[in-house]
Image (cartoon, rainbow, N blue to C red):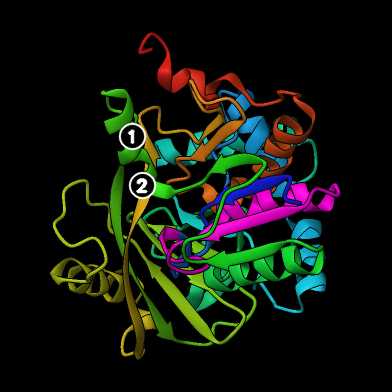
Amino acid sequence: MVDVTVIGAGIFGLSVGYACAKRGAQVRVIDDVAVGAGSSGGLVGALAPHTPHRWDAVKVFQLESLLMAAEHWRAVDALSGVSSGYGRVGRLQPIATARMLELSHERNLDAQVMWQGAAEWNVVKADAFGDWAPRTKTGYLVHDTLSARMRPRAAARSLAGAIAELGGEVLIGDHAAKGKVVWATGYRGLRALCEEFGFEVGNGVKGQSAVLRYDAGEVPQLFADGIYVVPHSDGTVAVGSTSERYFETPDQVDGQLDDLLEKVFTAFPFLAGAEVLERWAGVRPRSNTMAPMLGIYPERAGHYIVNGGFKTGFGMAPKIGQVMADLVLEGRNSIPDAFGVAAVFSGKI
């Protein structure tokens, strides 16, 4: 017996499968390539919040998911015996101007209200972080304590192992879908929806990144000049990424990554000379609302969609698994309107 079949073994598909299996459902996850074969097999693993400003349902959802993450990944890793590499290390961002310094102090007050004491958004002096601090013209940084890091591939393996430990199965190749069906098929799935319904449901954005041999220890991740620098627990640092709307080779690195690495070594001189251990390219799924797309598959009874993670997928995944399990297993819809499939399909069918 299979109660729920999930098509796609990326972070969204595995998170939904895990959440359903935890509630006692018999789960089957199917992927035609491998666990974490798409953008969920990337390198960076930055889990970062929205700015605590102009609070709305989407930011509340993300905050709840980020606050769930530590216990979520502890439980997943304990079941699977695989370390996801999760760590709530925080994040540093340079403050470039006096006006941004003023706004950053205002965001500190916003965070006290919106994050309700669960995390902080502080303005700190750069010299407090020594050589690890990114360059800043004002001498100040934003230090938030909510951001976290993980190793994406390891997290996907850990979820797959946890599903198996809960009695489910993760299958690679061509296998039958039984029971209720959840489509978590990434950017190729978005393209298929475009063809099926005849309008732009979403698209893919290519990203390129790299892993460097550099043991930074337990320090915050960095975000500066559009670059993520994420210290991992295995003595490496991941850097990324490019954002390419138009591309010919979705999974091949090219000169854009070379340019990115040159920018990294210039912006973060302490990384200059670090050995590049791996280069990666892949395509991240982005819905046409730029938010995750969750809900009932239009015109297909018993089918559901979870897609469009783009840059926020790993941070949103624990909560997305929860609300999709509510919908699939109990028929209870607790998905924010901005994330609903209806927001993407509004007026189109």
Q: Is residue 226 left or right of residue 17?
A: left
At x 52%, y 26%, the residue is: 300
Q: Is residue 289 left or right of residue 215?
A: left
The correct choice, above or below, for 130 with respect to 202 in the image is below
- The CA distance from mark 1 to mark 2 is 8 Å
The correct choice, above or below, for 340 with respect to 133 in the image is above
Number of on-image labels: 2
Tell me, for residue 21, which label it has, or none.
none
Q: Amino acid at mark 2?
A: Tyr
Residue 36: within the magenta?
yes
The picture places residue 118, in percent across and down from the top left corner, at 79, 45
Tell me, for residue 187, which label it has, or none.
2
The picture places residue 138, in percent across and down from the top left corner, at 41, 53
The picture places residue 121, in percent across and down from the top left corner, at 64, 46
Residue 249 lies in quadrant: bottom left
Tell me, for residue 202, which label it has, or none.
1
For mark 1, give the secondary structure. strand
The correct choice, above or below, for 1 with respect to 288 in the image is below
Q: Is residue 261 at least partly visible in the picture?
A: yes
Q: Is residue 248 left or right of residue 180?
A: left
Query: Which one is nearer the viewer's eye here, 83 or 224?
Result: 83
Q: Point out the residue furthest to the right here.
A: 24
Query: Badge 2, how many Cα within 10 Å: few under 14, some, many 20+?
Result: many
Query: Which one is nearer the viewer's eye here, 268 or 12?
Result: 12
At x 74%, y 61%, the residue is: 168
Query: Which one is nearer the viewer's eye here, 272 or 18?
Result: 18
Residue 90 lies in quadrant: bottom right
At x 58%, y 49%, the residue is: 177
For mark 2, give the secondary structure. helix
Q: Amino acid at mark 1?
A: Gly
Q: Are marks 1 and 2 in contact (CB under 8 Å)?
A: yes
**Residues shaded magenta:** 11-39
